[in-house]
Amino acid sequence: MNVMNRKLDRAELADIWSIDRSEVIDRVYYHYNGELVLRDEHYDVPGWHPGQIKKDSEVLLDCFDAGGSFQGAFADDKLVGVCVLENRFIGRSSDQLQLKFLHVSRQHRGSGLGRELFEQAADKARSAGARSLYISATPSENTVRFYQSLGCRLVKELDPELFALEPEDIHLELLL
Ligand SMILES: CC(C)(COP(=O)(O)OP(=O)(O)OC[C@H]1O[C@@H](n2cnc3c(N)ncnc32)[C@H](O)[C@@H]1OP(=O)(O)O)[C@@H](O)C(=O)NCCC(=O)NCCS
């Protein structure tokens, strides 16, 4: 299979929803007083929720128009992974950039695409002068372990706006 990675243009944002988001989750992390606790919980995520597509499409278009970076991974010309890096700084010292979106199609997970997209975004954030990459991560075991294996740790300081949006997420950062 021929896999390549390139920038997405604005019209291709609609193709993001062709990525197979389905996933079976058996364990989920909770954040209690600075500690991560893993609990058995079962979810069979069938794919993108229509409400989420509508809401996230607007958020992603706004990010794109503000200059955010959208990188796509293609397998035989089909979009199978997307990573989005914000270019508007956040944090008390305005020195953090958010990794806004990272998804790999189910059939292509576990083969290094997520790592490649993540590392590209981290390099870009570093070159832009960010001190850290901020990730509001889906709390599933696989997702949190993926970020941990790439060097991410619990944030020292929660971003109040991002926390209010997704309080059940695990908020992580990669120091750059
Ligand atoms: C999370 C996700 C983006 C990871 O992408 P991926 O292509 O499957 O990950 P990779 O194959 O690049 O794995 C990268 C590293 O993470 C590690 N990793 C991945 N899952 C892991 C797990 N469950 N436990 C421990 N390590 C894990 C791999 O071992 C790999 O390390 P290595 O390169 O040293 O072997 C992808 O699985 C996904 O889209 N999941 C569903 C959607 C999601 O949760 N997105 C994130 C929203 S915040």
Image (cartoon, rainbow, N blue to C red):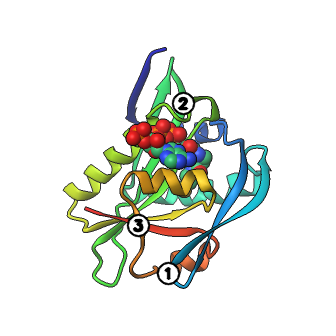
Q: Is mark 2 within 8 Å of ligand 1?
A: no
* Beta carbon at label 1 within 8 Å of ligand 1: no
Secondary structure at badge 3 equals strand
Rounded to the nearest angstrom, the CA distance separating label 3 from label 2 is: 29 Å
Query: Contact (CB < 8 A) between labels 1 and 3?
Result: no
In this rendering, the label closer to the viewer, 3 or 2: 3
Quick check: can you spot residue 10? no
Q: Quadrant of the C terminus?
A: bottom left
Amino acid at the residue labelled 2: Leu
- Relative vertical location of residue 4 with respect to residue 71 in this rendering, above or below: above
Residue 138 position (above or below residue 45): below
Q: Are marks 3 and 2 in contact (CB under 8 Å)?
A: no
Lateral position of residue 122 relative to residue 108, left or right: left
**Classed neighbour count for the residue bearing mark 1: other residues with Cα under 10 Å, few (<14), some (14–19), many (≥20):** few
Splitting the image into 4 quarters, where does residue 125 fall?
Answer: bottom left
Which residue position is annotated with label 3? 153
What amino acid type should be assigned to the residue bearing mark 1? Gly
Q: Quadrant of residue 13?
A: top right
Mark 2 vs 1, N-terminal side: 1
Dot 2: element: strand
Mark seen at residue 34: 1
For marks 3 and 2, the one nearer the N-term is 2
* Residue 75 rendering spot, x and y as whole percentages: 50, 22
Q: Which mark is residue 79?
A: 2
Judge from the rendering whether residue 49 lies leftward or rightward of residue 86; answer left or right.
right
**Residue drawn at x 74%, y 44% as measured from the top left:** 47
